[in-house]
Image (cartoon, coloured by chain):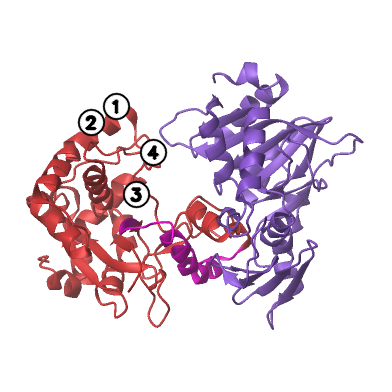
Chain colours: A red, B purple
Amino acid sequence: LTGRTVWLASYPRSGNTWFRAVYSAWRTGGPPNLDHLGTIASSRERFDDALGISSSDLTADEVDRLRPRADEVVDMDFGRLHLEKIHDRLSTPGGPEIVSAAATHCAIYLMRDPRDVAVSLAHQNGLSPERAGDMLCDPETAIADRTDDISDQLRQRLGTWSDHVSSWIDSKVIRVHVVRFEDCVADPGSVFSAALTQAGFTVSRQDIAAAVEHASFERLQSVEAAAGFRENRDRQRPFFRRGRPGAWHDELRPEVADRIAEAHREVMGRFGYRS
Amino acid sequence: LRPVVEHEAVSGLVELMDGEARIRLPGLATFDVGRDSTVGARPEPGTGQDEVACFTGSTAGALASLLAGTFPLRAAAVGRESRMLVICGRAAAGKSALAASLALLDPSYWVASDKVVQIDGLGRLLAGASGGVELWPPVAHRLGIESKGAVVRPSLAKRRYELRRFAGTDQPVTALVAFLDIDNRLAEPELHQLVAGREKLQALVSAQWHRRLIAPLGLGLGHLEWASSVARSIPMVRVNRPRQAMTLATVTELVKNAFEAGAIGAAETS
């Protein structure tokens, strides 16, 4: 792969924003600017601007077919490796990748215990934990998939949590480095350093340690409390909420937790999550 | 001197060929854009003309304008008498909704376009005024015109609504450019005047159709002159609003006041 894009791929609410905040702090050598953490691959503006077309004239399937072309145009804007956020699953079975392999250097896949993802999704979107659990188990789960309206995001197909993980981790096309959110929390300096180094960035442990400090969860919480966070779609609910692994023990009813664990037993087991 | 571009693919969908261009939309159609601004659409087998006509007025039409040496904006334009308001903004920021809302609120307003707006360096409208606005069902419903729309493309739920066209004899001149943006940190919409030249230029460039083709077409210097002139001669405001749909009425009021007050004085603060 000859591209310069490093995809930071994750199911929503898996620590993607925290990772990008640390990356931003590392790049700038100071506190991250939460207003400028970079674009997401599914940004409608990114697509329209790159291709000179109005995505609102296209169906969601047509947009999906053209998205790799937008990646290639955007990638040409950069003279060095750059991190791009993405929540889409990489591909549906037998289907093409949603990103351009030619624009890709590699991907970092950020993974989190799906039971904690369910808790976080429920809080962020005002859903019941049961409904959030359903989303993680539904092969048709997608974001921004209304056909009678548009939003600033293009449709993003997620599938089930296991579908999502597998689509990236088992890719034959893109080199993928797996990072667990729980390991980031336990030893952020080492894990972020290793992830960025494996992805091809030249980092020093000292610089990453400083970036982790600048972008600590507590600091992000306090910045959001003071000035808000532009990416947060509901200002009534904090984006940076708890940030600790294991919240599902307190916040998920056992039957919901069991159902998620049962549905994702194989993939969870593969990455050390006990069901 | 204008460099001759020979068959060079410079954008994901566009090929430039010695002053002419081709846009390929796989699975849909190919559009040939001539030096004389003509656009020919060739739908792929199984695709009806009605499925591709909308691109002629947007991406292909904008490319034709660029080949002709003008700099089309991804924008909507409305006006009153011969004064015009150009509404730019990120995709899905609400440009068409604001244009329709203004035209429906005040019957003295006309609509020029909601996709491609061409103005010269002094803000004069260069292309004809269409009077149409494309809206998605929730916005059309909110504005009370849901049942009056025409199909834009059979595969899409959005509809085109014909509103009042410009019928004057004078060439409309831009009195204000408004840049819409979404900021979910806000409780209410805010309007700020853009003062710094650099900020105005950046905002204009970001609103440009096919902006990555400007340099390969050898239009960089002309574009800089055009953008500098527009930035110098026309007041500009940025309107930030939270995503919630109910803010449309407030945004309409803010922008209408700024436009009618002659922009500069009223636009300094929200």
SS category of the residue bearing label 4: loop
Disc 3 and disc 4: Cα gap in Å?
Answer: 21 Å
Is mark 3 in CB contact (under 8 Å) with mark 2?
no
Q: Position of residue A190 (x, y in %)?
A: 8, 54
First in sequence: mark 4 or mark 2? 2
Q: Which residue is mark 2?
A: A222
Q: Position of residue B214 (x, y in %)?
A: 60, 54
* B50 in the magenta segment: no
Question: Which callout, 1 or 3, points to the residue nearer the camera?
Answer: 1
Disc 3 and disc 2: Cα gap in Å?
Answer: 25 Å
Task: State whether residue A225 appears in this view.
Answer: yes
Disc 4 and disc 2: Cα gap in Å?
Answer: 14 Å
Circle 2 Cα neighbour tier, 10 Å, few/some/many (<14 / 14–19 / ≥20): few
Circle 4 Cα neighbour tier, 10 Å, few/some/many (<14 / 14–19 / ≥20): some
Q: Position of residue B2 (x, y in %)?
A: 67, 57
Question: Chain ID for label 4?
Answer: A
Q: Which residue is mark 3?
A: A127
First in sequence: mark 3 or mark 2? 3
Q: Is residue A175 above or below residue B139?
A: below
SS category of the residue bearing label 2: helix
Counting every numbered tag in the picture gives 4
Q: Are marks 2 and 1 on the same chain?
A: yes
Is mark 2 in CB contact (under 8 Å) with mark 1?
yes
First in sequence: mark 1 or mark 3? 3
Question: Which callout, 3 or 2, points to the residue nearer the camera?
Answer: 2
Q: Which residue is mark 4?
A: A230
Q: Which residue is mark 1?
A: A226
Q: Is residue B93 above or below residue B237?
A: below
